[in-house]
Image (cartoon, grey):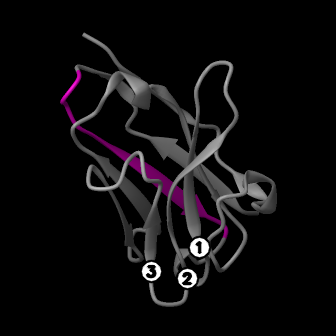
Amino acid sequence: QVQLVESGGGLVQPGGSLRLSCAASGFTLDYYAIGWFRQAPGKEREAVSCIDSVEGSTSYADSVKGRFTISRDNAKNTVYLQMNSLKPEDTAVYYCATDRRDCTVVPDYWDSWGQGTQVTVSS
């Protein structure tokens, strides 16, 4: 059974950093793409970053490019999202998703989701 568990969220001041983890079980992570999405109150879920299964290619939303970095540790079956220079507009519940080999920004095209981890950026 595919399971994803996010962790690492919390409250951080503007300009601070957090590292989110997405721990996978029930499948071998390096065969699948992992996407990070976020959803703020009253807003639709949006794509943040993705790492695919083929070459480990990465992609980022324009709003986080240069500040966030996605990486994968196959030995730990875990994907990370390093978030630096955080802004109040980054506040959201962050989710990881899988069950496909390539990346897409469309949330409906991903079948397996974690429960989410809250990130709050506030002074």
Q: Amino acid under label 1?
A: Ala
Query: What distance separates the C-alpha of mark 2 from that of mark 1?
Result: 5 Å
Tell me the residue that label 3 is attached to: 57
The local crowd at label 3, few if under 14, some if 14 to 19, many if 20 or more residues have their Cα within 10 Å, is: some
x 64%, y 38%: residue: 115
Q: Are the residues flagged by discs 2 and 1 in contact, CB closer than 8 Å?
A: yes
> Compared with residue 4, is residue 77 higher up or lower down, i.e. above or below?
below
- Please say if 53 is above or below 91: below
Observer-side mark, 3 or 2, equals 3
Residue that carries the numbered disc 1 in the rendered image:
33
Q: Nearer the viewer, residue 65 or 39?
A: 65
Q: Is residue 17 left or right of residue 25?
A: left
Camera-nearest residue between 114 and 123: 123
Q: Which residue position holds label 2? A: 53
Tell me if 23 is positioned left or right of 74 in this view: right
- The answer for how far apart the CA atoms under marks 3 and 1 are is 9 Å
In the image, farthest residue toward the front: 62
- Badge 2: residue crowd in 10 Å (few <14, some 14–19, many ≥20): some
* Residue occupying the point 62% across, 44% down: 46
As displayed, is residue 21 above or below residue 1? above
**Vertical placement of 21 versus 44: above or below?**
below
Q: Which contiguous range is marked in magenta? A: 14-26
Q: Residue furthest top?
A: 123
Quarter of the image with the C terminus is: top left
**Mark 3 vs mark 1: in front:** 3
**Chain-order first, disc 2 or disc 1:** 1
